Amino acid sequence: MEELTTQLLVYLKGIWKYRWISVIAAWVVAIAGWVIVYKLPDDYQASARIYVDTQNVLKPLMAGMTISPDLQQQVSIMSRTLISRPNVERVVRMVDLDIKVKDAKDQEALVKELMEKIKLGTTGRDNLFTIHYNNQNPRLAKDVVQSLLTIFVEGGLGDKRQDSSAALRFIDEQIQSYEEKLIAGENNLKAFKQKNIGMMPQQGGDYYSQLSAATEDLNKTRLELREAEHARDAIKRQITGDEPVMMVDQSETSPSSIVNVELDSRITALNKNLDALRLNFTELHPDIISTKRLIAQLEERKKEEAKLVVRNTGDPGKNYSPMLQQLNVALAEAEADVASMRARVEEYTARYNRLRSLSNAVPQVEAELAQLNRDYQVNKSNYEKLLERRESAKISGELGSATDLMSFRIIDPPTVSDRPVGPDRSKLFSLVFLGSLLAGIGIAFVISQVRPTFHSQASLREITGRPILGSVPMIWTDQEKVKSRKRLYAFGLSLLSLLGLYGTLMAKMV
């Protein structure tokens, strides 16, 4: 620590030896620096504040019917892209700064300078933005800020209209594309149905459900047929134990000339029913076939009954039995039921065999039809959604044109302060003053190192390596003391003068 203190004292003595050079250097640096700072051009700042209002009364009222953009995100993007190269180049043209531009290099330098000097500030979620620009020409600074405000407002409105128009064009193109797909799908379905007209699935279900239903109907009808045959056989067994008798004895008469009140009434009723069925069905319908067979059986029964002769003419009442007559009628009905059931069995058997014969082709047809219908339904669903979206886009565009979903309010128009905001001469004067003092001390220190002197016996002994026998002190006369005192006063006065000049400059800046 003692060595460090000793070395520091040596440095201070060396600087003190060349103090006048230090003062002169300080004065030169200070005067030159202050002149340069004083001659710096004034810098004026133009500023403006704008508020973006994203709240609108119609927005909640039209929710669900229109497509509302994310206004907060749109405002954020606008603020971030305001100071972009295209916008700055547009500002250059708007304020006629390009008149002084001679070549592309100057244009590039001018654009970069503007991008660096233009400052855009924001307060976050309040959507309040401030624009600042500094320039030596206050009018030019104000014009630049006004141009930026214009670009900011026009950019918000123009982008909204452009986005709406672009969305409508895209939706119209997609709708046209899906219309073509739907027409192609309808043509494919029509051609497929015409090609496979006999193998198309019915409304009740697919092929396997139809085959299962046909099998169930066939089994059910066969069971009913067996029941009807058993009932008929039971009636026949009852008739076998009785003497068959008839009311009349007519062996060679036509069915129409035979009088049998009960059978004639049934035949008449069946003929009326047959006429009603023919109005709705063809001759191949199972009910018409069974009715015709029943009528034919009743006609045949009339003939058979007419051909029966009375065996005992002495006692005609003995040959007639009401019970036998009733059994004959029941037998005829049972025969008709059996014939009807057989017709149904034949019909259901034919249907079952036809479906079994199509066991390989029909599932393939159903699978292809399901694929065609699925593709068609997907295209149709997308087409209907696009139509709905187009109407929503149109309403959104009209809403945006009729009302402003995002309005711009200029809180503070572009203004320029009367006093320049820069450069900060007070700060620069202070820095020059401190720099001049440091420069003077530094120069004195450098000279002391270039032209070193010995300030103590220890340093001389250390450098030369020789013993020091003694030292001769300086004896100052009164005249030398006065001169030394005057030089000291002059040195202090020079420093005070430099400090006073600095104070005067700072006072003028207030």
Image (cartoon, helix red, strand yellow):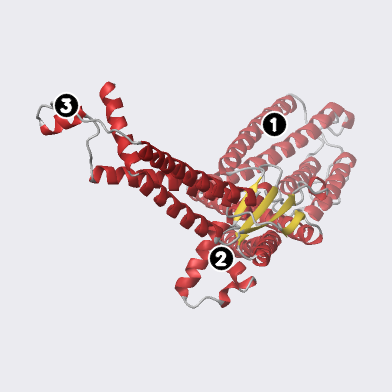
Give x and y (percent) for residue 500.
56, 46
Residue 52 sits above or below residue 11 on the image: below
Cβ–Cβ below 8 Å for labels 2 and 3?
A: no
Residue for point 74% across, 39% down:
336
In the image shown, does 176 or 153 lie closer to the viewer?
153
Instruction: List the residue tagged with mark 3.
Output: 470
Give x and y (percent) for residue 182.
62, 61
Q: Farthest residue in the top direction? A: 1
Looking at marks 3 and 1 on the same chain, the residue that comes earlier in the sequence is marked by 1
Q: Farthest residue in the front direction? A: 478
**On residue 86, which mark appears?**
2
Cβ–Cβ below 8 Å for labels 1 and 2?
A: no
**On residue 122, which mark appears?**
none
Q: Which three-letter amino acid code belongs to the residue tagged 1?
A: Ala
> Is residue 470 visible to the viewer in this orientation of the structure?
yes
Give x and y (percent) for residue 174.
61, 61
Residue for point 89% across, 43% down:
265
Q: Please rate how many residues cluster around mark 2, counting C-alpha atoms within 10 Å: few if below 14, some from 14 to 19, many from 20.
A: few
Of circles 1 and 2, the one toward us is: 2
In the image shown, does 246 or 139 lie closer to the viewer?
139
State the CA–CA distance, disc 3 to disc 1: 161 Å
Label 1: which secondary element: helix
Q: Please rate how many residues cluster around mark 3, counting C-alpha atoms within 10 Å: few if below 14, some from 14 to 19, many from 20.
A: few
In the image shown, does 103 or 37 lie closer to the viewer?
37
State the CA–CA distance, disc 1 to disc 2: 97 Å
Instruction: List the residue tagged with mark 1.
Output: 228
> Is residue 255 visible to the viewer in this orientation of the structure?
no
Q: Which three-letter amino acid code belongs to the residue tagged 2?
A: Pro
State the CA–CA distance, disc 2 to disc 3: 83 Å
Left or right of 501? Residue 11 is left
Label 3: which secondary element: loop
